[in-house]
Image (cartoon, grey):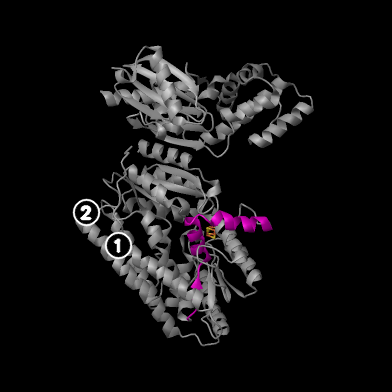
Amino acid sequence: MADEKIKSPKIQATEQMKQLITEYYIDAKTTKLPEGSHKPICWITSGGPVEFLIAADVIPIYPENHGAMCGAARIAPGLAEVAEKMGFSRDLCSYARADIGGALTESGAIPGGLPKPDFLLCCNNICGTVVKWYEELARIFDVPMFLFDTPFIHVEKPEHATEYVRQQCLELVKFLEERTGSGFSLERFAEVAMLSVEAVDLWKGVLATAESRPSPFTCFDAFIHMAPIVTLRGTQKVVDYYKLLKKEMEDRVAQGVGAVHDEKYRLIWDNIPIWYEMRNLGNLFAENRACLVADTYTTAWAVDIRIEDPLTSMADAYTKVYLNISIDIMLEQLVELMERYEADGLVMHSNRSCKPYSLGQYDLSRAVAERTGKPSLIIEADMTDSRVYSEAQTRERVEAFIESL
Amino acid sequence: MPVAGVDIGSLTAKAVVLQGREVLSTSLTQTGHNSRVAGRRALDMALDRMGLDEGSLGFIVATGYGRTAADFAGERITEITCHARGANRTHPEARTVIDLGGQDSKAIAIDERGKVLDFVMNDKCSAGTGRFLEVMASALEVELDDLGSLSLESTSPASISSVCTVFAESEVVSRVAEGAPKVDIIAGIHQAIASRIYAMAARIPTNEALIITGGVARNIGVVRALEQKFDTRIVVPEMPQHMGALGAAIIAGEHHE
Ligand code: SF4
């Protein structure tokens, strides 16, 4: 075990990213002020089809992104307690608990909490929890909610499923026209979709640079730099930002700069990050010369949209996200990831909050071992609720795992 | 030149001084609140027994939860690796190590050289740990060390369904109130622990060559209950509590070479 801490090089683009996200929240907060007109605000689930909102000039707000910020700032447990006191179970997703707590107390990781929604867009391609959560938000704020229902993919996606989701795209358009009072421009939508595709492609390009040895960044970096693709894809700013980031990563590859000093092991991360522990975990793996080169989480935003037929391909893409597919398809994707990044093992965060992500991890780890011969490690934690996490025990597991590689 | 392994656990700190393959001396002390002091004390105790001092040691490896505090060690290794190496030294045929420590329990699959192939841990609750047994012993007002032999006297073990320390304690209290004999209650507790450990170990490949390490291995009742569950004989090494320190000392020896 290396005792000396060797600092990983800092990613220069981080400053721009921070600025981008800060501006985004400032815009969202100030548009409600003062009296007079304001841009409508819509709260949307992380897997939701945000391109429609951008095209309709609606500001999207992601409670999950805010939940992650609260997790990183270590204030999520306090907000969750507010919801728990109201009777919400501690077994409920901690994003939901923290968000409900934050909505009621008007607080959170940004001053005064998230700007209030004018309406809600809930897409259940990530889980069923979001439906009940958004219904609760609809009650709290007394605003309408649009449910974008994506059928689960067990084996193959049937044609009628795409058609069903495509129809909802049209209904969503109508819903937005009613809420904003102006017509929805399909032309503008195609433009937004194109920018979204461009950003997604750039993001994929960023992630692909980690295929080289040493990897220029770790998944802990990716977790931070994914914020724009999650929240603001479909805008020019995001395209510009990822061009910058991609260039920096390509330069690192060209110069042989690795994120982890003297990279020895390459690992894949599964599940949502443990937001409050990112720095410690990053250091722990780095001290042990292990680089987490890719993950199943940030790749979830690398969806394909075909510009020739944005509506259908969007319906398709939003139905096929990682949490909306069966474990067999997940396994294929995991194996592909392991092979593409030449990984030595798999690190799975068994996330108490997120059942759809965590259920089946033991089976997956076994199946991955059978297919690739590579071992996995399971870390038990929660993405934002640090009350169920033990640092000493996690260190024990991580170090023992790396010792056994 | 002798080398040493120091295992600073949650309840006790242990040291083993090794010369070649020969164990020169061992020690065991309570960890208390200061891991570093406890580790050093364990080391000094083991050295004192041989009239040695630290300067006569070729290398020191620390393990256990308190290992990060062991500034006197040349290297720090997890107890999973160390238990595996220790068990492999005393019982080379062992392929599964069940370590029941003060505050957690683990099952480790190892190969013929003692390399860790896979492991599972239960560190979220105290079921099956020394702490759990301590609580049960005090609820029943018997000595911790007597639990094992008492349970062997049982003819019809009571049913204890919960392995949560808090729930099991109240279950035990109600069994006592119902008038169940203590020996049956204790046997029931051991069975509950064995089921829990068995379920945990099922996540990794286990086979018949089982060895048990850690303080709880001294409880013959738990060992018998585990044997029943796994349907195989389980080896209990001479010094189950020192296996981690032994493994650390073996690794220290390799460093020294
Ligand atoms: S349960 Fe999982 S997918 Fe659903 S909102 Fe929570 S973290 Fe997201």
Residue B238: assigned label: none
Three-letter residue code for mark 2? Gly
Q: Which residue is mark 2?
A: A256
Is any atom of residue A188 visible in this view?
A: yes
Is any atom of residue A93 visible in this view?
A: no
Marks 1 and 2 sit apart, C-alpha to C-alpha, by 16 Å
- Mark 2 CB near ligand 1 (8 Å cut): no
Q: Picture coordinates of residue A102 (x, y %)?
A: 58, 63
Q: Picture coordinates of residue A223 (x, y %)?
A: 40, 58
Q: Picture coordinates of residue A296 (x, y %)?
A: 42, 56
Q: Quadrant of residue B243?
A: top left
Location of ligand 1 given as a quarter of the image = bottom right
Q: Is residue B116 left or right of residue B188?
A: left
Residue A12: assigned label: 1
Q: The C terminus of chain B appears in which quarter of the rendering?
A: top left
Disc 2 chain ID: A
Q: Picture coordinates of residue B38 (x, y %)?
A: 46, 26
Q: Is residue A313 left or right of residue A203?
A: right
Residue closer to the observer: B19 or A343: B19
The stretch in magenta equals A57-86
Does label 1 or label 2 sit earlier along the sequence?
A: 1
Instruction: Mark 1 vs mark 2: tell me if same chain.
Output: yes
Query: Residue A212 magenta-drawn?
Result: no
Q: Residue at left 24%, top 54%?
A: A257
Query: Chief secondary structure of the magenta span?
Result: helix
Residue closer to the observer: A274 or B235: A274
Q: Residue at left 40%, top 43%?
A: A369
